[in-house]
Image (spheres, rainbow, N blue to C red):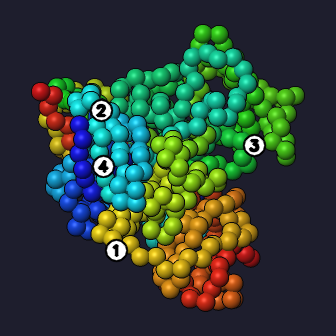
Amino acid sequence: MKKKVDAVIIGAGPAGMAAAVSLRENGIKNILLVDREPVAGGILQQCIHNGFGVHHFKEELTGPEYAERYIEQINKNKIDLWLDSCVIDIENNSKNSKTVVILSKERGISYITAKVVVLAMGCRERNRGNINIPGRRPAGIMTAGTAQKLVNIYGYLPGREVVILGSGDIGLIMARRMTWEGANVKAVIELQSYPGGLNRNIVQCLNDFNIPLYLSHTISNILGNNRIEAVEVSPLDENFEAIKSESFTLKCDTLLLSVGLIPENELSIKIGVKLDPVTRGACVDKNLMTNIPGIFSCGNVLQVHDLVDFVSEEAKNCGASAAKYINGKLEKSEEIPIRKGNLIRYVLPGKIEKGKPALLSLRPINPAENLYLVITTDTGVELFKRKYKNIFPSVMLRINIDIVPDDAEFIEIKFEK
Amino acid sequence: MKKELICINCPQGCNLEVEFDKEKILSVEGNNCKMGLTYAEEEVFHPVRMVTTTAAVMNGFIKLLPVKTSCPIDKSLTPNIVKEISKIKAEAPIRLGDIIIKNVLNTGADILATRTVKKNV
Ligand SMILES: Cc1cc2nc3c(=O)[nH]c(=O)nc-3n(C[C@H](O)[C@H](O)[C@H](O)COP(=O)(O)OP(=O)(O)OC[C@H]3O[C@@H](n4cnc5c(N)ncnc54)[C@H](O)[C@@H]3O)c2cc1C
């Protein structure tokens, strides 16, 4: 099948849905939203716990509830949604024409030509291969998100004696979920000296069930032939080397990995979108447009978010810029770079426009207390200053700058005492 | 008595230092907003939690219905409530917000569907 539209959005998670609604609200009629799953909603459908929407809807929702609010808007706006349809390629024909190649059981192969493409493919979890755990290769080792899908969508309990590596929020949420479903969660093991997930999840997912959290520890060996039988846990020295003389074993039949997320950018790389080595998402300008004119990016495929509320906000802005691009109204004033100073792991976007307001997302390198976040121009003008009692890499900060001065050559962002 | 708590009301997770006697809270420190005060009081005298789990669903286009308690419930009852919900077989069609169990285990809380499930045709 061949078809022409104004915009194709790849991925119908919260990012793709919010971008689609925003495109429509900005007057774009001919939109196609595509997802390879049988339902829209993305990762939210398996996140049945509460904790979504506190900022955006001013109430605490579960993942499926948050998803459903956007699905309703997609339906109400009569946005064309293709499910069970996987995008396998994008071609860049010209500034105003891209061809998106889609495979689906229902329609076979389709070539859709669009003026803009919005990348909203989300991210996937790092797995054993990404972190190189030594040992045998038995069954029973999977990512926490896979276990979440098995338990919450398909109704299978993947194991009874569980060890979790990594203290990211998905791992913590799964510790509670598996416990409630009757499994015995023996421990959560964390490489860093601080937890990766939110404090509230440490309390309600671990402490409530007396599940021990071993900080500055790792799994140094996996034992078992057909099925995993035990893991060897070792404390780490300052150089993150396992202290084998102090290691101990934990018997288990399942090992869940919650060791980080990677934006799913294979399609983007193929078409030549430039990625940022830190975020592993696209390098974008203030309009969330990539280095390829007409290709935009938002949500977890751009930067890993901990709050879906910010995903929706980012995607809304992205849809608005994409609409302007379609109408030939996306203007760009002169851009200046943002320099990362003390304790800043990344800041996004990497460039901002002179004379305009800007919205920055950033994360610190490590946790710290009682610091000021300061943003200054090279000319010495202070654009922002706020005190933070605590900062954590797991908590993204979002900062509004009213106006970027016209005479600045760059701005610097840093934490200081 | 003194206790250190972490407020779970929002992702900030404030570290609270709570002082209390047998009947009441004497002081709370470290909270960034009012929710911290209510949390400290509840957590010391009668801790409560939300429960989110799944129930089986018949004739639906999915096999499991995600559900939640209509309000936070007595923390010690959470395992019993999960068990209670696992006995249920809900019938599609179901709409988001439908009551699946009324006044579950006399807690005053209802169990609500958190997803719309159409009938499988
Ligand atoms: C386990 C877990 C717990 C979380 N807990 C919370 C929480 O408590 N509170 C909170 O606010 N946030 C939470 N988050 C974060 C939040 O859910 C995410 O930030 C958000 O869902 C990201 O949205 P997205 O649309 O970018 O990505 P996703 O939801 O991942 O959606 C991406 C979609 O793209 C589709 N796709 C990818 N590639 C293709 C392709 N080639 N063709 C077609 N379709 C494709 C996928 O099928 C998917 O549906 C959690 C996340 C996880 C994983």
Mark 1, residue position: A329
Q: Residue B68, position in %: x, y? A: 31, 44
Residue at image coords 68%, 34%: A131
Task: Characterize the local packing of mark 2: few (<14), some (14-19) or many (20 or more) Cα atoms within 10 angstroms.
Answer: some
Mark 4, residue position: A113
Mark 2, residue position: A109
Q: Which amino acid, mark 3?
A: Ser
Quarter in which the N terminus of chain A is drawn: top left
**Chain letter for mark 3:** A
| Label 4, label 2: how far apart the Cα atoms are | 13 Å
| Label 3, label 1: how far apart the Cα atoms are | 52 Å
Residue at image coords 71%, 65%: A343
- Residue A106: quadrant of the picture: top left
Find residue A216 and name its label. Answer: 3
Query: Are circles 3 and 4 on residues that touch, CB within 8 Å?
Result: no
Q: Nearer the viewer, residue A39 or A222?
A: A39
Q: Nearer the viewer, mark 2 or mark 3?
A: 2
**Chain letter for mark 2:** A
Q: Which amino acid, mark 2?
A: Ile
